[in-house]
Amino acid sequence: MKAIKHFITITKHRHKVIAHCKKAGILWQGLRHDLSKYSPAEFFTGAKHYLGTRSPNEAERELYGYSKAWLHHKGRNRHHFEYWTDYNQATRRVEPVKMPYNYVAEMFCDRVAASKIYNKSSYTDSHPLAYFQRSKNTRFIHPDTSNDLEELLVMLSEKGEDYTFSYLKKKVKEYKKKK
Protein backbone atom coordinates (compact mmCIF):
# COMPACT_ATOMS: atom_id res chain seq x y z
CA MET A 1 0.00 0.00 0.00
CA LYS A 2 2.87 2.41 0.81
CA ALA A 3 4.33 1.81 -2.67
CA ILE A 4 1.06 2.82 -4.32
CA LYS A 5 0.72 5.93 -2.15
CA HIS A 6 4.33 6.87 -2.87
CA PHE A 7 3.79 6.37 -6.61
CA ILE A 8 0.68 8.57 -6.52
CA THR A 9 2.46 11.29 -4.53
CA ILE A 10 5.55 11.49 -6.75
CA THR A 11 3.39 11.37 -9.88
CA LYS A 12 1.07 14.15 -8.65
CA HIS A 13 4.13 16.20 -7.76
CA ARG A 14 5.72 15.58 -11.15
CA HIS A 15 2.54 16.58 -12.98
CA LYS A 16 2.35 19.84 -11.00
CA VAL A 17 5.99 20.56 -11.84
CA ILE A 18 5.28 19.90 -15.53
CA ALA A 19 2.38 22.39 -15.44
CA HIS A 20 4.55 24.97 -13.67
CA CYS A 21 7.45 24.44 -16.07
CA LYS A 22 5.10 25.00 -18.99
CA LYS A 23 4.09 28.37 -17.45
CA ALA A 24 7.80 29.18 -17.01
CA GLY A 25 8.68 28.38 -20.62
CA ILE A 26 10.71 25.25 -19.85
CA LEU A 27 8.23 22.50 -20.74
CA TRP A 28 10.91 20.06 -21.96
CA GLN A 29 12.64 20.26 -18.56
CA GLY A 30 9.30 19.69 -16.87
CA LEU A 31 8.66 16.57 -18.92
CA ARG A 32 12.02 15.14 -17.80
CA HIS A 33 11.63 16.34 -14.19
CA ASP A 34 12.38 13.79 -11.45
CA LEU A 35 12.29 10.70 -13.66
CA SER A 36 14.97 9.20 -11.41
CA LYS A 37 12.34 8.92 -8.63
CA TYR A 38 10.91 5.97 -10.56
CA SER A 39 14.27 4.16 -10.63
CA PRO A 40 14.76 1.25 -8.21
CA ALA A 41 17.46 3.17 -6.28
CA GLU A 42 14.97 5.90 -5.35
CA PHE A 43 11.51 4.36 -5.70
CA PHE A 44 11.91 1.40 -3.32
CA THR A 45 13.46 3.57 -0.62
CA GLY A 46 10.72 6.16 -1.12
CA ALA A 47 8.03 3.51 -0.79
CA LYS A 48 9.63 1.98 2.30
CA HIS A 49 9.89 5.34 4.08
CA TYR A 50 6.70 6.90 2.68
CA LEU A 51 5.14 9.43 5.05
CA GLY A 52 2.77 11.47 2.90
CA THR A 53 3.50 14.72 4.72
CA ARG A 54 7.20 15.15 3.92
CA SER A 55 9.95 13.59 1.86
CA PRO A 56 10.71 9.92 2.55
CA ASN A 57 14.39 10.91 2.27
CA GLU A 58 14.05 12.69 5.61
CA ALA A 59 12.88 9.47 7.27
CA GLU A 60 15.74 7.50 5.69
CA ARG A 61 18.17 10.20 6.86
CA GLU A 62 16.84 10.01 10.42
CA LEU A 63 17.28 6.24 10.41
CA TYR A 64 20.77 5.96 8.88
CA GLY A 65 22.26 9.44 9.18
CA TYR A 66 22.14 9.93 5.40
CA SER A 67 19.81 9.14 2.52
CA LYS A 68 21.08 6.91 -0.26
CA ALA A 69 18.02 7.79 -2.33
CA TRP A 70 18.76 11.52 -1.98
CA LEU A 71 22.42 11.06 -2.92
CA HIS A 72 21.26 9.24 -6.03
CA HIS A 73 18.61 11.87 -6.79
CA LYS A 74 20.68 15.02 -6.36
CA GLY A 75 23.46 13.59 -8.51
CA ARG A 76 21.11 13.20 -11.48
CA ASN A 77 18.80 16.20 -11.27
CA ARG A 78 20.23 19.58 -12.15
CA HIS A 79 17.33 21.51 -10.64
CA HIS A 80 18.77 20.81 -7.16
CA PHE A 81 21.36 23.31 -5.98
CA GLU A 82 23.17 20.43 -4.26
CA TYR A 83 24.06 19.12 -7.73
CA TRP A 84 26.00 22.33 -8.41
CA THR A 85 29.18 21.93 -6.39
CA ASP A 86 32.68 21.48 -7.71
CA TYR A 87 36.28 21.48 -6.58
CA ASN A 88 37.79 24.96 -6.60
CA GLN A 89 41.50 24.67 -7.40
CA ALA A 90 42.31 28.05 -5.83
CA THR A 91 40.79 27.24 -2.43
CA ARG A 92 41.23 23.46 -2.65
CA ARG A 93 37.67 22.98 -1.42
CA VAL A 94 34.38 21.83 -2.84
CA GLU A 95 32.27 24.94 -3.27
CA PRO A 96 28.84 25.85 -4.63
CA VAL A 97 28.68 26.82 -8.31
CA LYS A 98 26.17 29.29 -9.74
CA MET A 99 23.27 27.44 -11.34
CA PRO A 100 22.22 28.18 -14.92
CA TYR A 101 18.98 30.17 -14.75
CA ASN A 102 16.83 27.56 -16.52
CA TYR A 103 17.59 25.17 -13.62
CA VAL A 104 16.83 27.89 -11.07
CA ALA A 105 13.46 28.21 -12.81
CA GLU A 106 12.88 24.45 -12.56
CA MET A 107 13.94 24.49 -8.89
CA PHE A 108 11.36 27.21 -8.25
CA CYS A 109 8.66 25.15 -10.02
CA ASP A 110 9.70 22.10 -7.99
CA ARG A 111 9.50 23.94 -4.65
CA VAL A 112 6.09 25.41 -5.40
CA ALA A 113 4.76 22.02 -6.48
CA ALA A 114 6.20 20.28 -3.40
CA SER A 115 4.60 22.88 -1.12
CA LYS A 116 1.25 22.30 -2.81
CA ILE A 117 1.53 18.51 -2.50
CA TYR A 118 2.63 18.44 1.15
CA ASN A 119 0.42 21.31 2.40
CA LYS A 120 -2.62 20.24 0.38
CA SER A 121 -5.64 22.54 0.92
CA SER A 122 -3.79 24.70 3.46
CA TYR A 123 -1.26 25.79 0.81
CA THR A 124 -0.64 29.51 0.38
CA ASP A 125 1.79 31.31 -1.89
CA SER A 126 3.94 32.08 1.17
CA HIS A 127 4.61 28.40 2.01
CA PRO A 128 7.56 27.93 -0.41
CA LEU A 129 9.25 31.09 0.91
CA ALA A 130 8.79 30.04 4.54
CA TYR A 131 10.32 26.64 3.76
CA PHE A 132 13.26 28.32 2.02
CA GLN A 133 13.87 30.74 4.89
CA ARG A 134 13.90 28.00 7.58
CA SER A 135 17.28 26.71 6.42
CA LYS A 136 18.63 29.72 4.54
CA ASN A 137 21.63 30.27 6.85
CA THR A 138 22.84 26.68 6.71
CA ARG A 139 22.33 26.03 2.98
CA PHE A 140 25.43 25.25 0.86
CA ILE A 141 24.39 27.20 -2.23
CA HIS A 142 26.02 29.81 -4.45
CA PRO A 143 24.92 33.28 -3.26
CA ASP A 144 23.68 34.31 -6.73
CA THR A 145 21.59 31.16 -7.01
CA SER A 146 20.16 31.71 -3.54
CA ASN A 147 19.30 35.32 -4.41
CA ASP A 148 17.66 34.30 -7.71
CA LEU A 149 15.49 31.71 -5.98
CA GLU A 150 14.62 33.96 -3.06
CA GLU A 151 13.62 36.76 -5.44
CA LEU A 152 11.10 34.42 -7.09
CA LEU A 153 9.79 33.07 -3.78
CA VAL A 154 9.29 36.58 -2.35
CA MET A 155 7.57 37.63 -5.57
CA LEU A 156 5.26 34.61 -5.38
CA SER A 157 4.41 35.41 -1.77
CA GLU A 158 3.74 39.09 -2.46
CA LYS A 159 2.36 39.16 -6.02
CA GLY A 160 0.97 35.68 -6.63
CA GLU A 161 1.43 32.91 -9.12
CA ASP A 162 0.24 34.59 -12.32
CA TYR A 163 2.58 37.56 -11.94
CA THR A 164 5.56 35.42 -10.87
CA PHE A 165 5.26 32.87 -13.67
CA SER A 166 4.88 35.67 -16.23
CA TYR A 167 8.06 37.29 -14.87
CA LEU A 168 9.88 33.95 -14.76
CA LYS A 169 8.98 33.13 -18.36
CA LYS A 170 10.48 36.45 -19.50
CA LYS A 171 13.67 35.85 -17.47
CA VAL A 172 14.06 32.33 -18.89
CA LYS A 173 13.62 33.69 -22.41
CA GLU A 174 16.30 36.34 -21.77
CA TYR A 175 18.63 33.67 -20.35
CA LYS A 176 18.16 31.41 -23.38
CA LYS A 177 18.95 34.30 -25.76
CA LYS A 178 22.26 34.93 -23.97
CA LYS A 179 23.38 31.30 -24.17
Image (cartoon, rainbow, N blue to C red):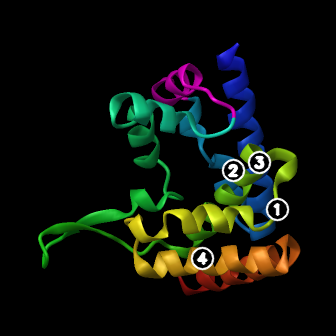
User: Is 97 placed above or below 72 here?
Assistant: below
Q: Amino acid at mark 1?
A: Thr
Q: Residue at x 77, y 51 (%)?
A: 116
Q: Point out the image quarter for the N terminus.
A: top right
Nearer the viewer's eye, disc 1 or disc 2? 1
Q: Nearer the viewer, mark 4 or mark 1?
A: 1
Q: Which residues are magenta?
A: 39-52
**Residue 59 percent location from the top left of the image:** 50, 32
In this image, 100 relative to 14: left or right? left
Of the residues tagged 3 and 4, which is closer to the observer? 3
Displayed quadrant of residue 125: bottom right
For mark 2, what is the residue? Answer: 114
Q: Is residue 59 magenta?
A: no
Does label 1 or label 3 sit earlier along the sequence? 3
**Is residue 146 something that shows in the picture?**
yes
Residue 119 - label: 3
- Kind of element beneath mark 4: helix
Name the residue rendered at 53%, 81% in the picture.
147
Q: Can you identify the residue that label 4 sits on?
A: 150
* 10 Å crowding of disc 2: few (<14), some (14-19), many (20+): many
Q: Residue placed at 60% from the left, 76% from the top? A: 150
Residue at x 65%, y 58% (from the top left corner): 111
Residue tagged by mark 1? Answer: 124
- On the image, the x and y values in percent for residue 153 come to 68, 73
How far apart, in angstroms, are the residues tagged by discs 2 and 4? Answer: 16 Å
Q: Secondary structure at mark 1?
A: loop
Pointers 1 and 2 in contact (CB under 8 A)? no
Which mark is on residue 79?
A: none
Cα–Cα gap, marks 4 and 1: 16 Å
Q: Is residue 50 magenta?
A: yes
